[in-house]
Image (cartoon, helix red, strand yellow):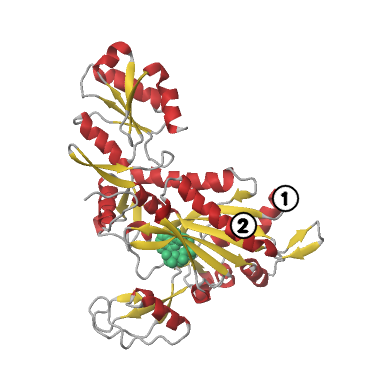
Amino acid sequence: MTVTKSGMSEDVADKINSLAKRRGFVFPSSEIYGGAGATWDYGPLGVELKNNVKRAWWRAMVQLRDDIVGIDAAILMHPRVWEASGHVENFIDPLVECGNCRKRFRIDELSDGDALMDQWRDGRADLSTVACPNCGQKKLGPPRRFNLMFKTFVGPVEDTASVAWLRPETAQGIFVNFENVQQSTRRKLPFGIAQVGKSFRNEITPGNFIFRSREFEQMEMQYFCRPADAPRLFDEWLAARRRWYDDLGIDDDLLRFREHAENERAHYAAKAVDIQFRFPFGWQEMEGIHNRTDYDLRRHMEFSGKDLRYFDEATNERFIPYVVETAVGADRATYALLCAAYDEEPDKEGIRVVLRLHKDLAPYKVAVLPLSKNERLTPLAREVYALVRPHFLSTYDETQAIGRRYRRQDEIGTPLCVTIDFPSLDDHAVTIRERDSMAQVRVPIADLVPALREKLGA
Ligand code: ATP
């Protein structure tokens, strides 16, 4: 079957998962012990890819903007933070357990889950006629409120005074530093604070590979503004964030917006729109844009007793800023970018698998390949590799036939291959082969680095 970028089929998920394992993108965590509860380790190619995703986000959200600054806050925070933020009380999923097979589910995973969620929110979910998705019996117990935060203890004594939580979102590190950042950078509204870092959620049903795991990374930005400006800025951020995905090469028909109904919004949000991606298993949230109003700063004022109001010199007013937030998972975005890039096309040897990753995201930019493993070619090929390596993340491969090696690079998304052949020994030129078009051009070795730079737009 031919799979195109926009016509993604379900088996693409299996293909991507197996490619990710086989080529060293992502491994199940603690695999030799049978895995560790839906956590994942990034291998040599995966760490490059995810770092490139985070770098692209940081560049767009911090470095290219003069109204946003970055921070890197601690994962362990004062436990009062999570009371103030509402997470101790409200960061809850409704958990049901089957009385027959003992499997556990979130209510929204049951048949007609959305309607059941609505009923649960209204306090009237009746599950007596609902079948267990696993065993089919109608023996689901009453929904329990399950807090997704991981609890731990700081210091040697495990008592209530030493409770700490692993942060379930990075945003609170930004809210508690609002005053520090505003005063140390002398920022005026509107301005944003951005952060990339680990978050932890004890998900009831993690799954779909790195889409939903218990330990993941978030890329979040909180944009502080005057309350009256929040609706306009919300729309602007929605458009800007969608453009970011377009710029990274995601086809428009793989993206859509979905606004949350009033009763499904998180406890802090006055408006919430998801940017959804068409994953092989259906449309799912990739990023959330939220109008968090002044909820978080107000609550931190109440709980900490510190005045976090902003003083507007122009109007002589003091007020609590509103916040428009953009929040995306680095792992989820990486997965979406892998799905969007995965392509198969027929060629004379069967099917060519190509990861059409944006060149800024590709783990390796250049592969250096001698035509064959030959003692006359190797020294020059090594010389070319040494020439290229300081400029672009590169790899070297001399095993197996050249056609196989091109395919190996196509499959991991390497945009350019440089081939050294026997004529290279005399004419001191090499061939650059492009991943997407498979077009080849010959360039003198002396011009190779600028030629690669031009093709990579680097
Ligand atoms: P979902 O409805 O999928 O559980 P959410 O609405 O709870 O997500 P947010 O709290 O808005 O998610 O978090 C922002 C982003 O963080 C999400 O859009 C997603 O990309 C990412 N994210 C959230 N939970 C997970 C998870 N368990 N694993 C991986 N990424 C996650």
Q: Amino acid at mark 2?
A: Tyr
Q: Amino acid at mark 1?
A: Arg
Residue 155 visible somewhere in the drawing? no
The residue that disc 2 covers is 223
Quarter of image, ligand 1: bottom left
Residue 311 in the figure: left or right of residue 229: right
| Residue most extreme to the left | 349
Residue denoted by label 1: 186
- Residue 409, quarter of the rendered image: top left
Nearest to the observer: residue 314 or residue 185: 314
In the depicted view, which residue is nearer to us: 446 or 158?
446
Q: Residues within 10 Å of mark 2 (few under 14, many from 20)?
A: many
Sequence-wise first label, 2 or 1: 1
**For the residues marked 2 and 1, what is the alpha-carbon distance in whole angstroms?**
15 Å
Q: Residues within 10 Å of mark 1 (few under 14, many from 20)?
A: few
Numbered disc in front, either 2 or 1: 2
What's the residue at 67%, 59% (across, down)? 225
Q: Residue 176: which quarter of the image?
A: bottom right
Residue that appears at 66% across and 69% down:
298
The answer to which image quadrant residue 433 occupies is top left
Q: Is residue 61 left or right of residue 392?
A: right
- For image coordinates 30% across by 18% down, the residue present is 380
